[in-house]
Amino acid sequence: MTRSTQWWQDAIFYQVYPRSFSDSNGDGVGDLAGITERLGYLELLGVDALWLSPVTVSPMADHGYDVADPRDIDPLFGTVGDLDALISEAHSRDIRVTMDLVPNHTSNQHPWFRAALAAAPGSPERARYIFRDGRGPDGAEPPNNWPSVFGGPAWHRVTEADGTPGQWYLHLFAPEQPDLNWENDEVFADLAKTLRFWLDRGVDGFRIDVAHGMAKPAGLPDMDITHNELLINDDDDLRFNNPGVHAIHRRIRSVMDEYPGRVTVGEVWVRDNERFAEYVRPDELHLGFNFRLAEAHWDASDIQEAVDNSLLAVESVGGVATWTLSNHDVEREVTRYGTEAGASREVGLRRARAMILVELALPGTVFLYNGSELGLPNVDLPDDALQDPVWERSGHTERGRDGCRVPIPWEGSAPPYGFSTTPDTWLPMPDDWADLTAEAELEDLDSTLTLYREAIELRKTRPEFAGAAIEWYGAPPECLAFRRVGGRLSCVLNASAEPVALPGGEVLLSSAPLIDGKLPADAAAWLA
Ligand code: BGC
């Protein structure tokens, strides 16, 4: 199956976590004007598009993924005018702007949910969410045994208008994030309004949150609870990936098709390749996040398998592969690779640098998470700094995702490193990041930022990166080597403990200096 060429098919997206990117008004939280001020940096980096994590109105129970008004900007981040300015400034630099869209749930402060609480059981207001009577003689047991992804039960019991304990509502995430009832046509009608609202303002597309959610199984049966880790996919999990979700994606696509050149990328935590492929059929999502590379351990065969699987996952429907090493929900790659047996943060950084060359050598769409280009590690935050709802919901057993969301260091030698004018940033910044600021790394030819810039530049300009397929070729043990079938770029990764000889060809770039012409351990190289 062939599809027409679109800008996003080999684009490099850069995920901005707005709270943590750049604070223009000194309140310790990043904002839209802050992002606009930093566009020159993003242009220099060479990215094609931004994905902004949610900036719409939210009480911030889950830092924006609890949306109270999907068609307005939260004052914490600025105004709709600030977004307009960001879009037009980004477009003038040839950078596209995509937004997060959260269709699975709203905030409990959304006017619909407030109306649902005020209305009676069985009312049209309640029918926009998933309200049920409880089990047991007095309805005191939740309607089924589903756990919330953030810990605790996925149901919350409400108090009815007359003060008596009443129905329960479903929240797959925090109680402040009630799930919408996607069998109710009002829900799609409202989402269509939201899509058009932003598309009409020039937004280039959407990252769709929990795109494998939305549809729920008939009768909401109990599930087998094997594990309930945050966003770990298990294809037997009844809460997600129900077949009804595809009709919803087709409806979203029909709106998107009114706006040629715009794109949707869904967060699809589905392991089975055939079922994953269903999401990127020609009339559903344009792209689906594939998280296998982010899940792969520092092991050549694990990485090779992740690459093969990601390519295979879209092959049957002629879709485009996507690649990501991290995002705002997972531990940063420097820390992941640096905490595997026998490794250190320094080794973690070497491996992260190697993996960006693997990722950028692959055909398809790449998603970078802000700060990865600086080689930032996760931060061990003190208990009293933690903000992720996961920390409270898990009864302080899961520390949550704050460690990968610490603000970006821009310049200077001490917190807040130019991120803000107040040292009182929403998450504290570490004292030892002076060498990791954008300013320091821009000037350093050996920095991770320089490596990213060079790699992105080569990927964009060299003919070796042509072609949609790769082929593997023989590599020493614990190494991998593949070649782009069209342009014949070679990428070699050394995950062994010893330097290895490289095949013939011009070395375009390596993640660490070669040793007597050999590729050292924990490194990767590109050859023409
Ligand atoms: C987002 C998370 C968010 C959750 C609930 C996701 O998968 O990426 O950050 O907490 O959806 O909206």
Image: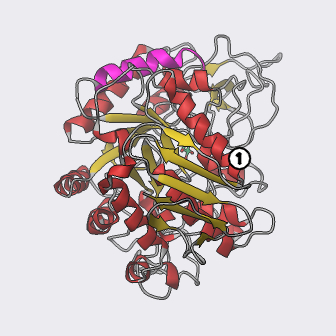
Question: 342 or 237: nearer the eye?
Answer: 342
Residue drawn at x 31%, y 44% is: 72
**Residue identified by numbered label 1:** 301
Is residue 55 among what the camera can see? no
Q: Is residue 389 above or below residue 6?
A: below
Q: Is residue 247 located in the magenta-colored stretch of the structure?
A: yes
Check if residue 301 falls in the magenta segment: no
Q: Is residue 68 above or below residue 134?
A: below
| Residue depicted at 37% across the width and 23% down the height | 252
Q: Main secondary structure of the magenta part?
A: helix
**Left or right of residue 425, residue 194 in this image:** left
Viewer-nearest residue: 376 or 36: 376
Q: Is residue 186 left or right of residue 167?
A: left
Ligand 1 visible in quadrant: top right
Q: Is residue 258 left or right of residue 312?
A: left
Position of residue 111 measured from the top left corner of the image (x, y, whole percent): 42, 34
Q: Nearer the viewer, residue 103 or 469?
A: 469
- The front one of 306 and 214 is 306
